[in-house]
Image (cartoon, helix red, strand yellow):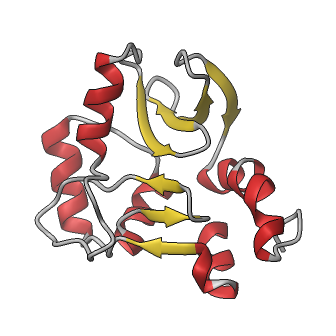
Amino acid sequence: MLVLLQDAKRVPRLFSPFGAIPEAEVQDWLRSSGLTLPGDLIELWQLTGGGDAFDSETIFRPTVPSVPNSCFVEDDIEGRNADHTAAGKPCGLYIFQQGAFLSAVSLSDQKFVTLTKGYEVELVFDSLDEWYAKTLRIEFGPRYGLKPDPE
């Protein structure tokens, strides 16, 4: 199970999912958008549809036929990426999270990255779990009673 979801099981107020997305809908969205994205991000979308974490962080939701729950408010990944592209984001980065900082997938190597305000790559991670544990969890976890290292 993804570390974010393990933490959310322990501390339910930590993560508010937008609503699970059936695998077929995620796969159709990936095909129609021409994207190849890491399997662990796809798994998160299938299980949760993205969501709000730690009150200030949003993991965006793909635009698919399934209706999201009521806490979803224009947090679609396509619209947010279009806005960031218009503001100067390079085309090789696909933003999936926004809050205290921006996070994206580097499309050339499928790594998870954090970005500066000028869209420069700041930190690089091999997996969604590593990204979460070394960014959001370190920054916000102690306020929610989480220990520094995932168990």
The residue under the point 38% across, 52% down is: 60
| Residue 93 image position (x, y, % from top left) | 43, 25
Describe residue 124's horizontal placement relative to residue 77 as left or right: right
Describe residue 139's horizontal placement relative to residue 85 as left or right: right
Residue 77 visible, this orientation? yes
Foreground of the two, 121 or 16: 16
The residue under the point 40% across, 43% down is: 37
Describe residue 111's horizontal placement relative to residue 125 as left or right: left
The residue under the point 27% across, 50% down is: 76
Task: Judge whether 65 appears above or below 104 on screen.
Answer: below
Task: Judge whether 89 appears above or below 103 on screen.
Answer: above
Quarter of the image holding residue 47? Answer: bottom left
| Residue 38 image position (x, y, % from top left) | 46, 46
The residue under the point 34% across, 39% down is: 36
Quarter of the image holding residue 69? Answer: bottom left
Quarter of the image holding residue 121? Answer: top right
| Residue 150 image position (x, y, % from top left) | 81, 68
Foreground of the two, 16 or 106: 16
Describe residue 142's horizontal placement relative to residue 88 as left or right: right
Foreground of the two, 99 or 122: 99
Foreground of the two, 11 or 33: 11
Residue 1 visible, this orientation? no
Task: Judge whether 76 appears above or below 121 on screen.
Answer: below
Q: Quadrant of the N terminus?
A: bottom right
How many marks overall?
Answer: 0
